[in-house]
């Protein structure tokens, strides 16, 4: 077998792909299918007997977060997204002989800070290991990680789900964090099937990662997505990671299995490299249902790695994990132990060790998302579920607070306009808050027009729609140009109300018989007649006055 060739210099490294690997895997799968055939009938019988027994799903997560650092974990190479291929590769990253790793203190501090925020126990002594496997984007043939003694263990992450008919009820959940470990990222491979070759970019090789391993305490895609989103907010608040899933700075592997309550956990599958919370939820829910269907039809679940095809909306088998892969873990000989200490455990004999003080990191911990939500609820009197939406959308809290400083409207009304109208427009146009053509000051100006009685609520919605298409246009000018200000002349408004009553004799008769609910229909008709320029409260008063003046059960003249 010829070894893969890698061309030197800047540009793409080229590694030959081997076609026989896929054939070997196919043969392996066929043999597995053949050996399991005799058991199918018995499996189906047992499956029918258990079909009425409910299933319970178990979900655990392994999350890789790229550490926010200017340089890589063990080299001085710069970290930059979308840089030209192989332009940020040091001798150590390319694994040239004689190069040695130098641990990046910033990466250690980020991992410790994350461990503290997740209520972890920080190991005062931490070790590095080599995990051996061959792949073209791993030049050394091994990854430096922490298999024996990671940097932090035994933590917890609290998160909440919005439930109920209108998503207005909060349910609190907690997932255990098994460990947080430091490790280096691999390079990036792009497979060109047409040319039967693989292109390798080593810019990402050696970038610092935190692997956060969560225990299987979740039971569905919604819970997993909520936990990942909460972790994402925590990492961003700490500055440990930008956690931008679109740029691959947060990648999730989900371990999924199903079983009947009271029975041992079932065989698990691993769904790899999920890079959005929405796809994470969909992939997990699909995999849960796939496993249930397979077992109820008498099949078996393979211990395998799968990927999620977002276009098809399903998971697809990649490779089986029935045979335990031997990574030949061994201590990293070129890195001394990492010593972490605080005031209670001062280190001794540290001349040949890597040493970091925990106390300053603990003191600098910022407000975490849970604290920020509580402050929003206390300060503005909004509902707890509204604070979740504000925090979950990047930049929305800042937008909301800027609006609040520039408007006389109370927070409960403002939050309605922002979460329903403003956020609705953003989602329709697939925009984020920073891309909005409407600034917080312009929205505040619109809300002030509404609060002062210059325009009605329906007219305000018309102005808002125009503002989306006329970037930077003042809502005051739009209201004047479109003649959307409220009708101030009560005589004119009374004349319009009389005209509506004259055209809706049936409704007037119903009201005179005691059906007061029909009055709302007349108010709506006046609003339509005035194109939203009438104040509903004033219209109601005028209509009620005119109805009292009309003879009961007699039509208007």
Image (spheres, rainbow, N blue to C red):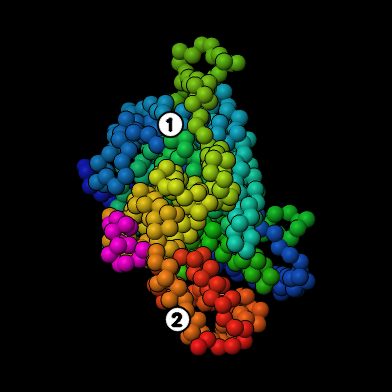
Q: Earlier along the polypeptide chain: callout 1 or callout 2?
A: 1
Question: Which class describes the residues within 10 Å of circle 2: few (<14), some (14-19), or many (20+)?
Answer: few
Could you tell me if residue 207 is visible in this image? Answer: yes
> In the image, what residue occupies the spot 53% across and 37% down?
368
Q: Tag 2, which secondary structure?
A: helix
- Check if residue 183 falls in the magenta segment: no
Q: Are marks 1 and 2 in contact (CB under 8 Å)?
A: no
The percent position of residue 491, horizontal first and vertical second, equals 42, 71
The percent position of residue 407, horizontal first and vertical second, equals 42, 47
Could you tell me if residue 228 is visible in this image? Answer: no
Q: Say which of 542 and 84 sits in front.
A: 542
The percent position of residue 262, horizontal first and vertical second, equals 78, 55
| As drawn, 480 above or below 328 | below
The quadrant where residue 547 appears: bottom right
The image shows a total of numbered marks equal to: 2
Q: Say which of 5 and 335 sits in front.
A: 335
Q: Tag 1, which secondary structure?
A: helix
Front: mark 1 or 2: 2
Question: Which class describes the residues within 10 Å of circle 1: few (<14), some (14-19), or many (20+)?
Answer: many
> In the image, what residue occupies the spot 32% across and 28% down?
98
| As drawn, 442 above or below 241 | below
Mark drawn on residue 107: 1
Position of 384 compared to 436: left or right? right
Q: Which residues are magenta?
A: 473-485
**Residue that numbered label 2 is attached to:** 499
The percent position of residue 67, horizontal first and vertical second, equals 42, 37
| As drawn, 146 above or below 377 | above
């Amino acid at each position: 077998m010829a070894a893969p060739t890698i061309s030197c210099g800047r540009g793409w490294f080229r590694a030959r792909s081997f076609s026989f690997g896929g054939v070997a895997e196919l043969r392996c799968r066929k043999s597995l299918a053949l050996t399991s055939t005799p058991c199918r009938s018995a499996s189906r019988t047992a499956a029918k007997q258990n079909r009425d027994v409910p299933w319970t799903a178990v979900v655990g997560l392994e999350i890789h977060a790229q550490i926010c650092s200017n340089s890589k974990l063990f080299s001085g190479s710069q970290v930059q997204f979308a840089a030209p291929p192989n332009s940020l590769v040091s001798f150590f990253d390319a694994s040239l002989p004689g190069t040695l790793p130098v641990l990046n203190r910033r990466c250690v501090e980020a991992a410790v800070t994350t461990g503290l925020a997740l209520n972890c126990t920080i190991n005062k002594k931490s070790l590095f290991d080599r995990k051996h496997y061959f792949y073209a984007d791993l030049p050394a043939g091994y990854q430096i990680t922490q298999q024996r003694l990671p940097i932090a263990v035994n933590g917890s992450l609290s998160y909440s789900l919005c439930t109920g008919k209108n998503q207005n009820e909060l349910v609190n959940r907690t997932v255990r964090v098994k460990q947080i470990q430091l490790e280096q990222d691999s390079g990036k491979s792009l497979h060109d099937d047409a040319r039967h070759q693989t292109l390798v970019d080593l810019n990402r090789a050696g970038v610092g990662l935190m692997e956060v391993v969560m225990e299987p305490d979740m039971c569905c895609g919604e819970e997993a997505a909520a936990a990942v989103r909460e972790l994402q907010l925590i990492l961003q608040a700490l500055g440990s990671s930008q956690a931008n899933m679109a740029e691959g700075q947060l990648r999730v592997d989900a371990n999924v299995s199903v079983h009947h309550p009271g029975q041992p956990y079932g065989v698990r599958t691993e769904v790899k490299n999920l890079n959005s919370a929405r796809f994470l939820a969909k992939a997990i829910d699909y995999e849960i249902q796939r496993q249930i269907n397979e077992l109820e039809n008498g099949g078996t679940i393979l211990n395998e790695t799968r990927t999620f095809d977002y276009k098809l909306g399903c998971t697809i088998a990649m490779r089986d994990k029935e045979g335990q892969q031997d990574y030949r873990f061994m201590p990293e000989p070129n890195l001394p132990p990492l010593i972490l200490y605080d005031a209670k455990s001062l280190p001794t004999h540290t001349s040949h060790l890597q040493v970091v003080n925990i106390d300053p990191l603990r003191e600098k911990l910022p407000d975490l998302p849970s604290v920020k939500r509580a402050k929003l609820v206390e300060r503005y009197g909004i509902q707890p579920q509204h604070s979740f939406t504000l925090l979950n959308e990047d930049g929305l809290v800042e937008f909301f607070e800027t609006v609040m400083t520039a408007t006389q409207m109370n927070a409960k009304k403002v939050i309605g306009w922002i979460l329903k109208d403003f956020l609705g427009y953003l989602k329709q146009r697939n925009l984020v808050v920073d891309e909005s053509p409407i600034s917080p000051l312009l929205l505040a100006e619109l809300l002030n027009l509404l609060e002062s009685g210059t325009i009605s609520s329906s007219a305000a919605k018309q102005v808002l729609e125009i503002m989306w298409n006329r970037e930077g246009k003042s809502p005051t000018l739009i209201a004047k140009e479109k003649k959307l200000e409220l009708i101030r002349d009560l005589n004119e408004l009374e004349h319009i109300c009389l005209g509506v009553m004259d055209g809706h004799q049936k409704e007037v008769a119903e009201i005179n018989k005691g059906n007061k609910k029909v009055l709302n229909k007349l108010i709506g008709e006046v609003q339509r007649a005035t194109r939203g320029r009438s104040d509903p409260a004033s219209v109601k008063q005028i209509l009620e006055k005119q109805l009292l003046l009309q003879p009961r059960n007699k039509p208007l003249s």
